[in-house]
């Protein structure tokens, strides 16, 4: 029997794959059999060593940075993981920080999806898109106005693109990670009071691991998820259910 969770013979492009969640997604896809293209503005050499894949340089400060990536190669799976965050009180938040976050997190996600879809449709093929959303696709957060807006937007365009492309052979879904053990959460985990408050709300009783997101991405990219379109899957240890 064919393994419905296998990605053998597939090529997956993972953005922001140099570390953390992106690296975990890339390595999980490689374990599932995919050839992985790790993309980032920083070196993805470590990820390439773990996956046996390849790397390309993409800096999504230019939201159309990936417009030519899909033209000369068959890529079956796109994971839009690259993202940035800026923190400040909303009364002090600058237009520069607003635009920088929206460009990378939302505008680049949309136009990378668009470039991928054009290539898939041109070859009359099929494809999978997995966008990385956030708990702040559902909640407001504090002091991260552009990040919250961008991640609400990621959830919205995931649903919109699923509506347009499901019948044309592309599955578009998203993952909303909870509190994950990465460099971005090191300060929170090092603060005993803040870490305790977070853990008390998580029904699973632990911080998430990057691998939790990686394996979920493999599922959404696999044949097992063929009838899943427009979902924003919370991988948060039960945080949003609390």
Image: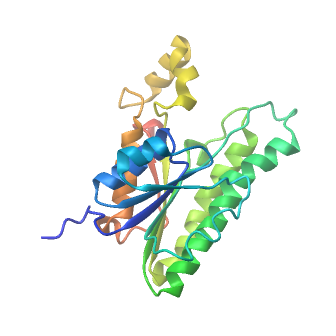
Can you tell which quarter of the image residue 142 is in? top right
Foreground of the two, 157 or 4: 4
212 in relation to 14, above or below: above
Residue at 66% in and 67% down: 111
Farthest residue, direction left: 1
Q: Percent position (x, y) of residue 60?
A: 68, 54
Q: Percent position (x, y) of residue 210?
A: 42, 39
Count the marks.
Answer: 0
Q: Percent position (x, y) of residue 53?
A: 40, 55
193 on left or right of 9: right
Question: Can residue 216 be seen at all in this image of the molecule?
Answer: yes
224 on left or right of 61: left
Question: Can residue 160 be seen at all in this image of the molecule?
Answer: no
Residue at 47% in and 34% down: 180
168 in relation to 212, above or below: below
Q: Percent position (x, y) of residue 2?
A: 17, 70
Q: Quadrant of the N terminus?
A: bottom left
Can you tell which quarter of the image residue 33 is in? bottom left
Residue at 38% in and 27% down: 206
Residue at 61% in and 65% down: 112
Q: Quadrant of the C terminus?
A: top left
């Amino acid at each position: 029997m064919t393994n419905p969770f296998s990605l053998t013979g597939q090529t997956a492009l993972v953005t922001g794959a140099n570390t953390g969640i992106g690296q975990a997604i890339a390595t999980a896809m490689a374990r599932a059999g995919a050839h992985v293209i790790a993309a980032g503005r920083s070196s993805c050499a470590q990820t390439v060593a773990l996956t046996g894949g390849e790397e390309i340089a993409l800096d999504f400060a230019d939201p159309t940075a990936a417009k030519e990536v899909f033209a000369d190669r068959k890529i079956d799976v796109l994971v839009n993981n690259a993202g940035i965050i800026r923190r400040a009180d909303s009364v002090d938040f600058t237009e520069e920080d607003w635009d920088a976050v929206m460009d990378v997190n939302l505008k680049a996600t949309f136009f990378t999806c668009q470039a991928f879809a054009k290539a898939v449709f041109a070859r009359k093929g099929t494809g999978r898109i997995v966008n990385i959303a956030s708990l702040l696709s559902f909640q407001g957060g504090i002091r991260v106005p552009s990040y919250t807006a961008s991640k609400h937007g990621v959830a919205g365009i995931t649903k919109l693109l699923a509506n347009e492309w499901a019948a044309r052979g592309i599955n578009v879904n998203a993952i909303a990670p909870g509190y994950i053990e990465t460099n971005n959460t090191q300060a929170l985990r090092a603060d005993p009071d803040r870490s305790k408050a977070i853990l008390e709300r998580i029904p699973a009783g632990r911080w998430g691991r990057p691998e939790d997101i990686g394996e979920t991405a493999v599922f959404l990219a696999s044949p097992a998820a063929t009838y899943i379109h427009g979902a924003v899957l919370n991988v948060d240890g039960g945080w949003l259910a609390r």
